[in-house]
Amino acid sequence: MAASLTPLNPAARLPPGPRAAFATSSRLISCLVTESLVRAIYFPLKSNDATGFAVLLSGSLSSRPPQPIDQPYSIKNEEEDILGIVPLRYVPVFKHDGSDPRGKEIGLLDPLDMVAVVFEIQQGEDGDTEVPLIKAILTNLSNRPGWDLSGLSSSSLSFVPSKSPLSIWNKFAKSFNVEEEMVKSIAEEFDSSVKWQQYSFEHPPKAATFDSPSIDWEQSIVEGHPTHPMHKTRIYLPPMTPLTPGSYDLYNPLLRFISLPRSSANVTYEFEELTRRIGEAASAADTNSNSNSTQGANGVTANGKEAKNLIDLIPKDHVLIPIHELQIPHIKQKFGKEAVVYGEEWTVGVKAQQSIRSIILPTSIYYPSPSPSSPPVSDSFNPNPSNPLWSTPPPFTPALSLKLALGLKLTSAIRTISPASAYLGPRFSKWVVPGLSFDRRILWVARERGSVVFGGDTDGGVVEKEKSLSQGTEQRGTGSAFEEIAKHCAAIVREAWEIGSEDREWVLPKEYNLGGTGELKGKGERLIVCTALVESGHEGVGDEPAVVRIFGLDTEEKRVEWLDRFVHLFFAAFLPPILTNGVAFEAHPQNVLARFALEEPHQLLGFVIRDFGGIRVHPETLFSSTSTGGPGGPSGGIDVFGQSPTRSNPSPVVIPGHSILAPDLEDVYARTYHTVIHNHLQQLIRVLGLHYNGKGWEVVRRRFGEVVGRESGLWGSWMGSEGEETKTFPGKCFMRMRMQGMYRFHLHGPFPNLIHYKGVQDEEIDY
């Protein structure tokens, strides 16, 4: 059952509506099974339509130990033992310790394992096109011990193709005793995901190429996260007006502007300097158009003169803040007593990245030439410009992008910016990144150069203020009522390495030039967000994944060679700070940009990592690894809490209790496994057709062993000890977290350890 070709998803042959429903249903089922919320039992099947099938047991039955085989699972009504049946194209990954005597228990079920149909029990008759398949499955199952299907012949019950993930979810939730309000909330998110996914299928983005700018790759996403069931969810928080698919272009929004009294804004580092140019670029095409009635917001300065640009309107004691235009209702509702909202005539057109709330600015604002009335973008962020390990590759200084607060729920998180995140990013960039051990020739960090977050009183209410962590500013506690409001008024300035990459000279060191004899040099890069590499279904190019299409990977040999280069450089870039400093970047596909040469054969040159919200830091290891020895003991270490008298950073980097803090190194290893192995590399290996034959995981094991020594804690954690492999590893549980209302703090469960996966074995498909 080894697959030698890229496993294209047959769901692509469905009309957009059913295809969208299956896209969400398959992800829901994947989570329920992989998170052990639902026990799934595998059986092989001789059929032209499927190689096997999975029987999904109900939530209540799955929460108990397996029944003996002489106590059969039965079908008597819609709420009985079987939640559904999923025909499979490929053999899934099994649990090593499954205990149900009826068959192999599935440990990891991926949407790409499935045939594009799910059968569930309902009142009514069999479907049409899938009748032969479900009949073959039921015949197979009825001939096996431990099953009682007599209810199908003695009642009007039958297995029919599921038309919506809501039906599957509601049945599971009822059998699992999920609270009613949570059932409704999650159902709303599934419904939204299906609607937005259908629109994406009906209006697919154009296929990006190496001639396409990086932002086109960011906007080329058809489906998004490969296993998250809320992968396309768009929920607008009141007072925002709910938008229907197609009614608003989320990828091409406008920046609006507000200002806050300086006393009500917690500003970090260079935020004001770096955002001034955005205000200067704001157009005032029609100063007589409707604008907010707030004083000073109507295009006239305090002395009555007409403003030539937005900067002229900003009171000297105020801070200018760019705001996503959709966020204005939240600003008016929550901060109306302090915020000055400037009229709709003061806008800047921008382009959104994949995350929707992060945007790139017109190149004329920052790159290639500075604004005539502002100094060039300096690199005052660089503590030691003379040290080549601490500086950006000369002569390039990155352009800038913005991360904006947006009261929009994407996947299962509201995309605002917490005060803790606004506090962390610039400080981590300035005081931690320079001290980390990684090869700056192949890994560039998109530093966060400045931030702002609301720091005043909310709606005139009394708020208990906590003492400042540094420099006399005020911060409120994480998770507080204040934070829930303040996070709606925040912004972060981040470096954008992708802008201007076409003109950049590059060097690939000889140790990373696989198969070559020396370093490579050239000019022109294309930075591609890694999520886009695994996407398919673009307009006019069929269903081939982008990575196969743009690199011409038309043979298995080419795909193995491409993956080998990718994994080699990926591990060399991201594992050293984990091994040395106890710091893990969140290197999932949306956070990582791959750097490719514009010249054929488009050599991989390295990576850019962005976003610090999901990093993991073990404070003790970071401090000890960055300290220098001497007669007086260690000195100069990075202390994220800012308490050590020998620290190199003058103030705390994190607010106590922040979600990035790891209690031990095992926690760092677990987060890295999820982002790197389970998420990033697994999906890449699957779309390259190198999962079921095990060849992709063979590459991972070999390259991992070249970077990580057997004596390291990371090796022992991921690989196990001599003679005892690590069979399972803690994986991030999307549905368990969502049912408990968790987002920033993760909940993990035992997933099969894919590093040891050898591919489908012959005995697994024995009929």
Image (spheres, rainbow, N blue to C red):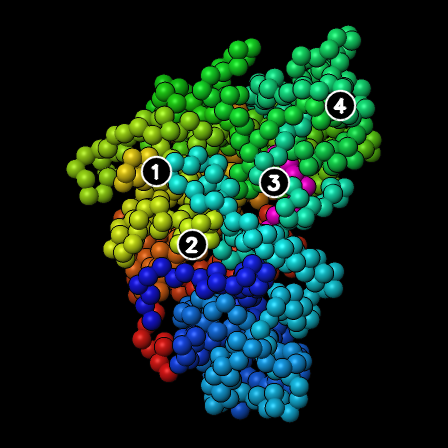
Locate residue 683, reporting x and y percent: 42, 55
Asked if residue 386 lies left or right of residue 428, the reply is left
Q: Is residue 340 visible?
A: no
Q: How far apart are marks 1 and 4 (CA)?
A: 46 Å
Q: How far apart are marks 3 and 1 (CA)?
A: 27 Å
Amino acid type at mark 4: Ser
Q: Looking at the rendered structure, which numbered label has been put on residue 542?
A: 2
The C terminus lies in quadrant: bottom left
Amino acid type at mark 1: Phe
* Residue under pointer 1: 596
Locate residue 305, reporting x and y percent: 75, 8
Segment colored magenta: 404-413
**Label 2: few (<14), some (14–19) or many (≥20) C-alpha neighbours in 10 Å:** few
Q: Is mark 1 on a helix, strand or loop?
A: strand
Locate residue 392, reporting x and y percent: 39, 25
- The residue lying at 44 percent from left, 66 percent from top is 113
Which mark sits nearer the N-terminus, 2 or 4?
4
Q: Distance between the residues labelled 2 and 3?
A: 25 Å
Q: How far apart are marks 2 and 4 (CA)?
A: 46 Å
Amino acid type at mark 3: Leu
Between 765 and 215, which is closer to the camera in this rendering? Answer: 215
**Residues at badges 2 and 3 in contact (C-beta under 8 Å)?**
no
Q: In this view, does 124 lie above or below 533?
A: below
* Residue under pointer 3: 250
**Residues at badges 3 and 4 in contact (C-beta under 8 Å)?**
no
Q: Is mark 4 on a helix, strand or loop?
A: loop
Q: Distance between the residues labelled 2 and 1?
A: 24 Å
Q: In which quadrant of the rendered view does residue 528 lie?
A: top left
Q: Looking at the rendered structure, which numbered label has been put on residue 289?
A: 4
Asked if residue 560 lies left or right of residue 310, the reply is left
Between 52 and 491, which is closer to the camera in this rendering? Answer: 52
